[in-house]
Image (spheres, rainbow, N blue to C red):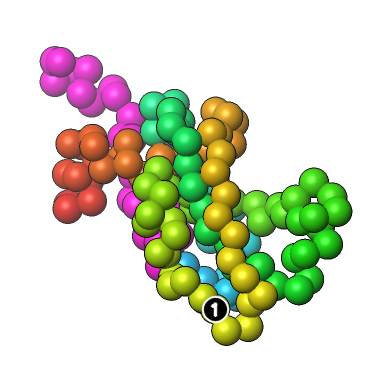
């Protein structure tokens, strides 16, 4: 790539993207008032990434603690809609995430799903596999 082409090419891994990813990873401690802006920012910034960073070609797994209030929508209707959530490709990791039990929950459920392209906000594994992402994260 020529120096001129490098100057024209937009920065993929911006500071805004790295900030959004970091905020998502740090979490919101179950505070829904914090979750919304963190999620909105992640969706906005990750939406600027090339499609290869917004696809999950594999089956993904997610563990969700279930509370009494969750049982009716889960069993009687079309399930639970938690909006944006972190899924992973390692079933064992999903099962161990945040421990096996949460005292105030009824139980935990493990979900398996092959995501459609429009369901994926960002694929962290694809980001970490990219040398340019490592440079941006280290920089």
Residue 9 highlighted magenta (yes or no): yes
Residue 59 highlighted magenta (yes or no): no
Front position in the image: 59 or 18: 59
Residue 24, position as x, y percentages in the image: 45, 60
- Classify the position of the N terminus by image quarter: top left
* Numbered disc total: 1
**Residue 44 seen anywhere in this rendered image of the structure:** no
Location of residue 115 by image quarter: top right
Residue 71, position as x, y percentages in the image: 77, 64
Front position in the image: 8 or 50: 50
**Residue 109 seen anywhere in this rendered image of the structure:** yes
Q: Residue at x 43, y 56 (%)?
A: 94
Rendered view: 83 above or below 11: below
Residue 125, position as x, y percentages in the image: 32, 41
Horizontal side of 80 relative to 15 (left or right) equals right
Residue to which mark 1 is pinned: 102
Rendered view: 33 above or below 47: below
Q: Residue at x 23, y 35 (%)?
A: 130
Residue 35, position as x, y percentages in the image: 58, 65
Horizontal side of 42 relative to 128 (left or right) equals right
Horizontal side of 11 relative to 37 (left or right) equals left
Q: Which residues are magenta?
A: 1-26
Q: Residue at x 58, y 29 (%)?
A: 116
Main secondary-structure element of the magenta-colored stretch: helix
Q: Crowding at label 1, few (<14), some or many (≥20) Cα neighbours within 10 Å?
A: few
Indicate the secondary structure of the residue bearing disc 1.
Answer: loop
Front position in the image: 81 or 66: 66
């Amino acid at each position: 790539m020529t120096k001129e082409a490098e100057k024209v090419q937009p920065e993929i891994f911006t500071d805004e993207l790295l900030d959004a990813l970091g905020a998502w990873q740090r979490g919101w401690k179950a505070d829904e008032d914090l979750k919304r802006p963190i999620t909105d920012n992640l969706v906005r910034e990750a939406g600027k990434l090339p499609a290869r960073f917004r696809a999950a070609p594999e089956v993904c797994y997610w563990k969700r603690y279930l509370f009494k209030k969750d049982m009716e929508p889960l069993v009687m209707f079309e399930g639970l809609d938690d909006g944006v959530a972190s899924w992973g490709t390692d079933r064992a990791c999903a099962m161990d995430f945040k421990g096996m039990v949460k005292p105030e929950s009824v139980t935990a459920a493990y979900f398996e799903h092959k995501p459609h392209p429009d369901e994926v906000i960002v694929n962290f594994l694809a980001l970490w596999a990219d040398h340019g992402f490592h440079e941006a994260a280290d920089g």
